[in-house]
Image (spheres, rainbow, N blue to C red):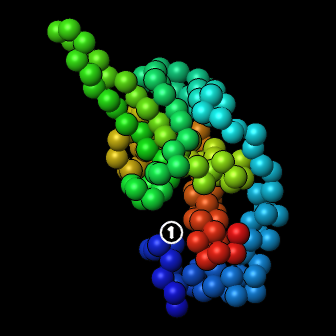
Amino acid sequence: MQPWKYLAGYPDHLLQQVRELMDKGRLGAMLAEKYGEAHAVRSDRQLYDYVQELKDRHLRQSVPLAKVAWDGKLQVMKHALGTHTAISRVQGSRLKATREIRIATVFRDAPAEFLKMIVVHELAHLKEAEHNKPFYALCTHMAPDYHQLEFDLRLYLTHLEAGQG
């Protein structure tokens, strides 16, 4: 069985089901049927507004975001789909920290639910740095179907990597 980097760690019986869908050419159709709705977020400004809206709804007391942007090099350079960074700068005798979120451009053309999933993931890092139980509890608070979306996103990325998308 072919190892897929996005599906590493999943049980063999699940990987076998994915293999059967891919062999029949049905994985893309299944995902399109389930997540057919595209989003209209194209520019960095629209992405900032989208992220800020989710942040205001679920994380009002968290630190402000200085920048939110699409990043075309993210998936290739850092092997990540999104990043959350805190940048510290010296201003006079004080240290000022700003927060940035960058989202891989693969999400520009991805279904709306997958964009929401990655944004929720990066917003959760504002409160929880590690991928631990409180982190995932916060993710499911913001998106109740977070775990299913994450798995389906992994299927989508595997589908794209296989050249079927």
Residue 162 location in percent, x, y?
61, 77
Residue at the spot 35% in from the left edge and 41% down from the top edge: 129
Name which quarter of the figure residue 141 lies in: top right
Q: Nearer the viewer, residue 141 or 67?
A: 67
Q: Position of residue 89 (x, y in %)?
A: 26, 22
Q: Secondary structure at mark 1?
A: helix
Give the answer, above or below, for where 63 lies relative to 37.
above
Residue at point 48% right, 82% down? 3
Q: Quadrant of the C terminus?
A: bottom right
Give the residue type at disc 1: Tyr
Q: Residue at x 51, y 87 (%)?
A: 2
Instruction: Kindly give the residue lying farthest to the left in the view shown.
Output: 93
Residue 135, horizontal then vertical, whole percent: 43, 44
Would residue 110 be found to the left or right of residue 139 on screen? right
Compared with 73, 49 (above or below) is above
Left-right relation of 2 to 46:
left
For mark 1, what is the residue? 6
Task: Please indicate whether residue 18 sits to the left or right of residue 71 in the image.
Answer: right
- Please, which residue is most extreme toward the top here? 92
Residue at 59% in and 65% down: 157
Q: How many marks?
A: 1
- Spot the residue most to the front: 73
Residue 51 drawn at (x, y percent): 59, 32
Is residue 123 visible in the rendered image? The answer is no
Q: Tell me where residue 15 sits by quadrant.
A: bottom right
Q: Is any part of residue 142 visible from this angle?
A: yes
Quadrant in which residue 45 is drawn: top right
